[in-house]
Amino acid sequence: MPADPNPTNASISHRTYFYPMPYPLPPGTPIPYSPGLPSRNTLDLPATPVEPTSSLVLTSTTKQFVDIRVVKPILKEDPELPNEGGPRARQSLANVGACRLDWAFAGTSSSTPIPDPYPHGITEHAATASRHAEHHRAWPGPITHATWTHWLDSRHPISFFSASIPKDEGTMFPLGATQTLELGQGVNPATGKMWVYEELWTDEAPRGAPTREETEPPVYSIVLRTEDEQHDVRGVVIRLGRYCQGIVMKGGYVSVERWEWVAEDGLDEEVGRWKRSVRIGDQFLPCAPTFTPAILSVGGKVRYWDYEWVCEEKVAWREGLVNEDAGIGEGQV
């Protein structure tokens, strides 16, 4: 279930790198591992973490999220990001090179503070853990156990979704005010075997998106959702500050979009416009209505052909003040 609206829940997270490691980790492996590279590399793994995708996660004030990961250019003639749409993409390892969609999913998140699970700074057998002195490592914030519950997932057709979706969870180590290292494990989709991984996430503070009509707007968190069980359709769109992205699936077919607010050239004041940076697939996603929050209200609907999208969240805040729009929109907006 979504959490109560709170701007402190909202986040814009860019993945800085993905670092795979063997499963299970041998005893004595430093944790976290990748921040110690290249000087500390006891497993003789690659000395430099890399990021193979453009990955962005938008989390709303109610902890609903959309996570879209697009493979970076493979060929010289490839655009920086795919933005032309085209035939609907059936997500599979066979066509990931063609559509460049690595993974896209949406759902709800939760996190719980926990004690340092590696008090000695390394992995170890439980039977010998008491032989080592605890390091009592200092962190800039609490370590947490995070869980992401997927409501739709590009790797799992809607019709078989509930039975096939794996657990998505990780241990989050705060490295600074804006950076968090995630330690997780799961099945490598390319090999079908388990692996351990670390992901470095960098957060960006949500900001308002000025226009000529509104030069000092608040920050908006908006969530739209569609669901049609009879036709195996699910979709979520989230706008947070100067970003908006969405995913819609019909069975195993996937369409995604990402939009960003960009400053207009040649203007003295900071105003701008929304520009699409990613489009894969050919299904409609109602990102554009979120750019004009005045036309949306909680409970209101956006209709396009057989799709009906409901506005589930519209929260605005400025300088710590939260304003919730709880009005009910009648009919089409």
Image (spheres, rainbow, N blue to C red):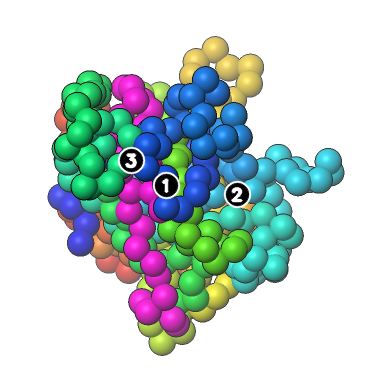
Residue depicted at 57% across the width and 37% down the height? 45
The answer to whether mark 1 and mark 2 are in CB contact below 8 A is no
Residue that numbered label 3 is attached to: 123
Q: Position of residue 144 (x, y in %)?
A: 23, 40
**Mark 3 Cα shell of 10 Å, populated few (<14), some (14-19), many (≥20):** some
Residue 331 forms part of the magenta stretch:
no
Q: Position of residue 39 (x, y in %)?
A: 52, 20
User: Looking at the image, is mark 1 or mark 2 nearer the viewer?
Assistant: 1
The answer to whether mark 1 and mark 3 are in CB contact below 8 A is yes
Residue that numbered label 1 is attached to: 25
Residue depicted at 22% across the width and 47% down the height? 126
Amino acid type assigned to the residue bearing label 3 in the image = Thr
State which quarter of the image contains the N terminus: bottom left
Residue depicted at 55% across the width and 75% down the height? 252
Amino acid type assigned to the residue bearing label 2 in the image = Val
Q: Is residue 24 above or below residue 164?
A: above
Res. 6 in view: no
What SS does tag 2 mark? strand
What SS does tag 1 mark? loop
Q: Is residue 160 above or below residue 126?
A: below
Q: Which residues are magenta?
A: 159-185
Dot 1 or dot 3: first in sequence order is 1
Residue 70: mark: 2
Q: Which residue in the rendered view is the most extreme toward the top?
A: 268
**Mark 2 Cα shell of 10 Å, populated few (<14), some (14-19), many (≥20):** many
